[in-house]
């Protein structure tokens, strides 16, 4: 059956008495030039018919992998192959004639002398002109599987099947198999080339499987691929012809041809070329897939944006979008540890606890306590809100056993809901959380109302300050709570230490102090205790450390304990909670003032901390103890927003945080809850050292009023106030006033490495 070939000239193969590849070595580069590629493209006139080539290719691959004539097949194995029902291809009836025709043409061309591989390849492309590129190559691969399969089947079964033995005798295969060790390099070369052909064919098929809505033929990535695919198809078919030439040449030829080794080298060269083509196509395929993923993620992100901008009758669409809608039970109940559906959260207030896997022990411990007080106490029956952990995993690093163990340890301590499989959280959700809710490292608690609407972008500050009293955790509730608050010791310590709460009720004098200056601590506690004894006032002193309590603070606590200087909090979670509540008060107050006075909230790069903390400072020289300080964007020219300088709670909180940021010791001395004196530790120590000069006023005014009056001379205009707060650069306040002089503070960039 003749194949129509092109009239374009191609180099003619040398005429020999057996098929050879040596004469076409020079075609390895010539056939890739523009003329030959134009010739190949000229054979391609698809009629639009489309069929799934993957089932056929699976049969082809299976057949080619089993077809090696060196494989040994027993009677039992042959029965197993006959019973294999995996080779059912619906389209095979429509394609079997085409496959048979191609197989016959290849066998015919490879059996004669002077086989022109290029002309045969172009002829086959003409025969398959109406098929797509992936179908062309699969059909020719099917023809190879047909011919090579017959050869291999006869060789494998001739020892156990009489018919196979007769056919093998006609093909002189027994004599051939006697020299199998001599033939092994050539057979290995054939098998290696076939493996390369299978790989490149699957690669071509996968290009056709790319979704056209994301990777159409007009996209730049696909246009690049489409210029390479015809070349890949050409060399695949041409290599198939080389394999067929080898198979045909093995039948009925003498020992001299059997012992020839040059053909194995030719096949290896073709395998190398096909592997290179497959490598280039694979890189382009990976590039296309990455672009498709990016487009799909962007579309999913936009869909999520639209979802949150839409009013819903309940929260189901939102929750399913956040927690993998394809899974009917994507969550685990933290109490029962059983998988549950998001249906349990329908029309409930849902608080999304958003974090990575680096949650501090203190943070999780305190949050669990607050949650349990609401859900397992007297209000447990109400179940007024539910918490769901939304872990944000860094996808730039693979999900490994270490991360899984870390995740499971954290989840085991959580009494609320959490995902069964955190890696199934859609990248679009992660992107939305980072961009819309501005999650970086610090955990968030985003509150959704029963309709799935965000009513508070971060309720953690409210939870740290007021606990469940802040329910339903909306910005309106936050504002209402602040209107009811005044500066008092109860607000400062909450219920962190029951002993302090009792001391407040008993109207004893209470002194809270902090810092890490050991000499100051020894002098201050000794002097204040002596004065309290002299004026006969009941005094309780408690050391509250510093923010981010680490080893240095633990050493200070051990020293205080050993020398019995005062009370202290042995549990670092209590120290952490004291300071995080102060930071939360500052954040909440600043947010409230920004909202009340319409101050815009912009994102700026200047003044940002990378990573971790961000700093605000006034007249601060370079301080080696706190890292390098770089001037940012000073705001000394701005007016102070009305109300900020008159907010006593805000100013007191800023003062305490400024002491902590500057490394200064400090103390708050209170009588009951409402009468408080807060001061810089060094000045307070100096004032107490002059007690003899003002102790007479104590009898008439009381201790705190007398102390307050004695401190007035120590209040000077010269000061250097520093405020460093943990947070992200995007949330840096545009205006922060000094707690001492009420003027706007300058903004600096702080890079800090604190290896405690």
Image (tube, rainbow, N blue to C red):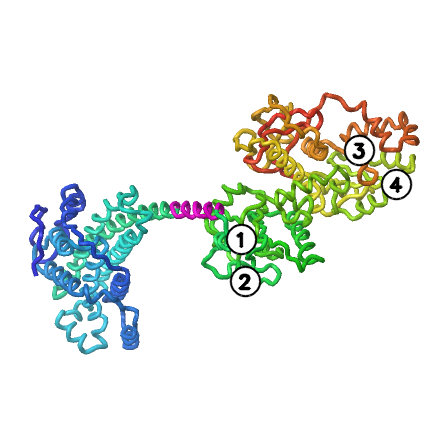
| Residue labelled with disc 1 | 402
Marks 1 and 3, how far apart in space? 49 Å
Give the magenta part as a residue range: 294-309
- On the question of residue 458 being in view, the answer is yes
Secondary structure beneath disc 2? strand
Which quadrant is home to the C terminus?
A: top right
What residue do we see at 56% from left, 31% from top? 600
| Residue labelled with disc 3 | 677
Q: Are circles 3 and 2 on residues that touch, CB within 8 Å?
A: no
Q: Tell me which label, 1 or 3, sits earlier in the chain.
A: 1
- 444 is higher (above) or lower (below) than 611: below
What residue do we see at 56% from left, 55% from top? 347
Secondary structure beneath disc 3? strand
Marks 1 and 2, how far apart in space? 23 Å
Task: Return the residue nearer the eye: 667 or 154.
Answer: 667
| Residue labelled with disc 2 | 339
| Residue labelled with disc 4 | 538
């Amino acid at each position: 059956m003749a194949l129509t070939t092109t009239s374009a000239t191609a180099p003619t193969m040398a005429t020999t008495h057996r098929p050879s590849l040596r004469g076409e070595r020079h075609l390895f580069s010539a056939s890739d030039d523009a003329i030959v590629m134009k010739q190949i493209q000229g054979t391609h006139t698809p009629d639009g018919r489309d069929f799934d080539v993957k089932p056929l290719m699976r049969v082809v691959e299976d057949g080619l992998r089993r077809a090696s004539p060196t494989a040994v097949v027993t009677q039992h194995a042959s029965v197993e192959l006959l019973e294999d029902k995996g080779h059912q291809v619906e389209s095979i009836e429509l394609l079997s004639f085409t496959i048979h025709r191609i197989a016959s043409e290849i066998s015919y061309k490879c059996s004669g002398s002077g086989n022109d591989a290029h002309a045969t390849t172009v002829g086959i492309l003409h025969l398959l002109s109406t098929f797509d590129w992936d179908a062309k190559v699969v059909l020719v691969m099917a023809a190879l599987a047909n011919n090579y399969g017959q050869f291999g089947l006869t060789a494998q079964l001739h020892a156990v099947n009489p018919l196979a033995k007769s056919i093998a005798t006609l093909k002189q295969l027994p004599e051939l198999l006697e020299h199998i060790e001599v033939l092994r390099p050539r057979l290995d070369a054939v098998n290696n080339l076939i493996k390369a052909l299978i790989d490149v064919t699957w690669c071509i098929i996968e290009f056709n499987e790319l979704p056209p809505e994301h990777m159409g033929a007009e996209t730049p990535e696909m246009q690049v691929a489409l210029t390479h695919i015809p070349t890949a198809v050409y060399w695949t078919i041409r290599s198939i012809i080389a394999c067929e030439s080898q198979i045909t040449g093995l039948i009925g030829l003498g020992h001299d041809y059997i012992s020839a080794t040059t053909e194995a080298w030719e096949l290896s060269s073709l395998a190398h070329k096909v592997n290179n083509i497959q490598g280039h196509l694979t890189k382009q395929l990976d590039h296309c897939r990455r672009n498709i993923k990016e487009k799909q993620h962007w579309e999913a992100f936009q869909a999520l944006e639209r979802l949150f901008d839409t009013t819903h009758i309940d929260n189901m669409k939102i929750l399913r979008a956040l927690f993998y809608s394809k899974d009917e039970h994507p969550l685990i109940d933290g109490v029962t540890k059983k998988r549950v559906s998001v249906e349990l959260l329908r029309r409930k207030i849902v608080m999304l606890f958003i974090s990575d896997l680096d949650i501090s022990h203190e943070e999780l411990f305190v949050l669990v306590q607050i949650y349990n007080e609401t859900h397992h106490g007297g209000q447990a029956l109400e179940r007024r809100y539910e918490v769901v952990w939304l872990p944000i995993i860094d996808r730039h690093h693979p999900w490994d056993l270490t991360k899984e163990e870390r995740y499971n340890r954290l989840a085991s301590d959580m009494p609320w809901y959490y995902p069964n499989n955190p890696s199934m959280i859609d990248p679009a959700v992660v992107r939305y959380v980072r961009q819309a809710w501005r999650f970086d490292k610090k955990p968030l608690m985003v509150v959704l109302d029963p309709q799935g609407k965000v009513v508070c972008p971060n309720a953690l500050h409210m939870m740290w300050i007021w606990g469940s009293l802040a329910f339903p955790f909306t910005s309106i509730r936050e504002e209402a709570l602040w209107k009811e608050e005044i500066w008092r010791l109860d607000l400062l310590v909450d219920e962190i230490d029951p002993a302090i709460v009792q001391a407040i009720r008993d109207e004893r004098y209470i002194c809270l102090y902090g810092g890490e200056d050991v000499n100051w601590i020894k002098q201050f506690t000794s002097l204040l205790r002596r004065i309290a004894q002299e004026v006969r006032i009941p005094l309780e002193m408690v050391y509250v450390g510093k923010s981010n309590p680490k080893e240095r603070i633990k050493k200070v606590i051990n020293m205080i304990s050993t020398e019995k200087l005062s009370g202290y909090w042995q549990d670092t979670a209590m120290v952490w909670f004291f300071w995080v509540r102060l930071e939360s008060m500052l954040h909440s107050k600043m947010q409230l003032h920004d909202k009340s006075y319409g101050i815009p909230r912009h994102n700026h790069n200047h003044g940002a901390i990378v990573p971790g903390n961000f700093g605000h400072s006034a007249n601060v020289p370079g301080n080696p103890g706190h890292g390098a300080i770089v001037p940012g964007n000073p705001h000394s020219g701005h007016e102070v927003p009305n109300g900020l300088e008159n907010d006593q709670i805000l100013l007191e909180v800023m003062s305490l945080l400024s002491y902590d940021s500057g490394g200064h010791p400090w103390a708050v001395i209170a009588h009951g809850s409402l009468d408080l004196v807060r001061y810089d530790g060094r000045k307070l120590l100096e004032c107490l050292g002059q007690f003899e000069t003002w102790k007479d006023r104590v009898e008439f005014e009381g201790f705190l009023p007398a102390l307050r009056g004695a401190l007035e001379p120590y209040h000077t205009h010269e000061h250097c106030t520093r405020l460093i707060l943990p947070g992200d650069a995007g949330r840096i306040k545009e205006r922060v006033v000094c707690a001492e002089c009420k003027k706007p503070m300058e903004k600096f960039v702080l890079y800090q490495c604190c290896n405690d």
